[in-house]
Image (cartoon, grey):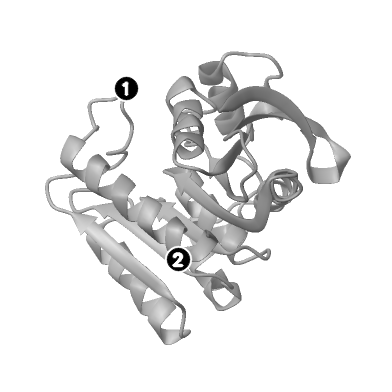
């Protein structure tokens, strides 16, 4: 594989870094946009992009926090992003769309692109999948997909669940049964909205797992849930992107 940091043209023509990891060879290979979690564009997330490349996907992870602290370590950039009120949804959608265009245009691409997000990125993956044309989406324990009116902000003015009618691709959701946001009750609410709108989806919840169970450098990491979750992701993307 080849893994490198590139620059893409995102929202409003602004240039942001993105990590691109892709298999070498004739392909054709599908693409995946990886949306990082709130802690930022960190080494474990870039490792996820390389894992996708090793599995035969061209994976790209845009740095959604770059504008708030250009060149700063991921922890400082995440803090600056939180201080600014979070990444605006319209900005995120445009940045992810730009990243999808990059992998879609690779000479060994098959033209299909999916999106996956973790934590806040899970919510963003849901929003993006309801906003632009993609071939598959994965929400890994995305918090605040279900949001009350007092939780909405200028950056995130619409509850993601209210965007469900716009979902245009199959959706996989992976959740921890011990998570509080999304709680099992929130997951059931999302499932109900998807079913009511006739969407193609599959949800899986893991007993004994909490939030961020994929995150290898945090105490929340749950080996059994992460291993099974990875298999479900690769199977799902394999069915819808290849």
Quadrant containing the N terminus in the rendered view: top right
Q: Position of residue 13 (x, y in %)?
A: 87, 40
Give the answer, above or below, for where 142 lies relative to 67: below
Write down the quadrant of residue 83 in the picture: top right
Q: Position of residue 128 (x, y in %)?
A: 61, 58
Q: Nearer the viewer, residue 51 or 133?
A: 51
Regarding mark 1 in the picture, which secondary structure is present there? loop
Residue at the (32%, 55%) spot, across then down:
232
- Badge 1: few (under 14), some or many (20 or more) residues near its Cα, within 10 Å? few
**Which residue matches tag 2?**
171
Question: Which residue extends farthest right?
Answer: 13
Q: Position of residue 154 (x, y in %)?
A: 66, 51
Write down the quadrant of residue 3 in the picture: top right
**Which residue matches tag 1?**
217
Residue at the (29%, 53%) spot, across then down:
175
**In the drawing, does residue 31 fall left or right of residue 120?**
right
Residue at the (33%, 32%) spot, across then down:
215
Give the answer, above or below, for where 132 lies relative to 68: below
Residue 101 in sight from this viewpoint: yes
CA distance separating discs 1 and 2: 27 Å
First in residue order: circle 1 vs circle 2: 2
Give the answer, above or below, for where 188 lies relative to 32: below
């Amino acid at each position: 594989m080849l893994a490198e940091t590139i620059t893409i043209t995102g929202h409003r023509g602004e240039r942001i870094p993105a990590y691109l990891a892709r298999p070498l060879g004739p392909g054709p290979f599908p693409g995946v946009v990886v949306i990082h979690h709130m802690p930022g564009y960190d080494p474990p997330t870039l490792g996820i992009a390389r894992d996708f490349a090793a599995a035969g996907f061209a994976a790209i992870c845009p740095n959604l926090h770059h504008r708030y602290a250009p060149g700063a370590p991921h922890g400082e950039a995440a803090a600056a992003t939180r201080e600014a009120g979070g990444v605006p949804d319209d900005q995120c959608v445009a940045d992810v769309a730009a990243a999808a265009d990059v992998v879609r245009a690779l000479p060994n691409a098959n033209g299909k692109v999916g999106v996956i997000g973790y934590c806040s990125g899970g919510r963003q993956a849901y929003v993006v999948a309801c906003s632009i044309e993609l071939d598959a989406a994965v929400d890994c324990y995305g918090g605040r997909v279900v949001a009350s009116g007092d939780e909405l902000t200028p950056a995130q003015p619409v509850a993601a669940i209210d965007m469900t009618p716009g979902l245009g691709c199959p959706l996989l959701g992976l959740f921890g049964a011990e998570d509080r946001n999304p709680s099992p009750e929130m997951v059931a609410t999302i499932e109900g909205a998807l079913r009511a709108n006739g969407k193609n989806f599959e949800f899986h919840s893991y007993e004994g797992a909490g939030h961020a169970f994929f995150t290898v450098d945090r105490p929340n990491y749950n080996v059994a849930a992460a291993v099974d979750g990875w298999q479900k992701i690769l199977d799902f993307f394999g069915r819808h992107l290849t």
